[in-house]
Amino acid sequence: MNTAHSAVFDAIKTAGPTQADAIARVTLVAKLLDNAVMIPGLNRRIGFDAVLGLVPGIGDMISAALASYIIWEARQLGLPRWKIARMIGNVAVDTAIGAIPLAGDVFDVFFKANQRNLRIIHEHLGTPKRGPREIDGTAVRVEERE
């Protein structure tokens, strides 16, 4: 019976989530917390971090708890301790200054700690933040195609 359980856990471990899955999850959380909605007229994006910051006291704590998920995933991806400490510093600054009434809410709109932490992960893993900068292939004018 014990070997059967071991085989099941080994199969789950080998077929489990990949690095790409972890990056996709972290990217989604960072986008929701920092860039979820466009503010009309200001041409500026805000996320649930800034919205939660409007709730006095507990809003910033909930936001910090959600941001700590990104740090946990980064640790699971194998980032070194000094990068993890830098990510914790980003969240600590965001939480501490974000707790100040009104000024903290404005700060949350401009200081996007989760996007900064996502950038640290991408730089460490060497994964592109966006698509390729150069596209392989040949450019052809539309009139020349036939």
Image (cartoon, helix red, strand yellow):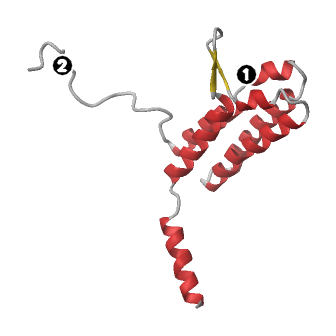
Q: Residue at x 88, y 29 (%)?
A: 99
Q: How many marks?
A: 2
Query: In the image, is residue 52 above or below residue 146?
Result: below
Q: Quadrant of the rendered structure where residue 141 is? A: top left
Does residue 52 appear in the picture of this structure?
A: yes
Which sits in the foreground, 10 or 85? 10
Name the residue located 52 percent from the left edge and 63 percent from the top edge: 16
Residue of label 2: 140
Measure how far apart labels 1 and 2 are at the Cα level: 42 Å
Query: Is residue 89 positioned above or below 40 on the image?
Result: below
Pick the front one: 40 or 30:
40
Instruction: Please state, as top left, top right, bottom left or bottom right, where the C terminus lies in the image.
Output: top left
Relative horizontal placement of residue 72, taking residue 89 as reference (left or right)? left
Q: Nearer the viewer, residue 135 or 79?
A: 135
Q: Is residue 85 visible?
A: no
Query: What's the residue type where badge 2 is placed?
Result: Val
Q: Residue placed at 61% from the left, 12% from the top?
A: 43
The residue labelled by disc 1 is 109
Amino acid found under the numbered disc labelled 1:
Val
For label 1, the SS is: helix
Q: Horizontally, is 49 left or right of 97 in the view?
A: left
Point 76% across, 27% down: residue:
50
Q: Residue furthest bottom?
A: 1
In this rendering, position of residue 43 left or right of residue 53: left
Q: Farthest residue in the left direction? A: 146
Q: Position of residue 91 (x, y in %)?
A: 77, 37
Neighbours of disc 2 within 10 Å: few (<14), some (14-19), many (20+): few
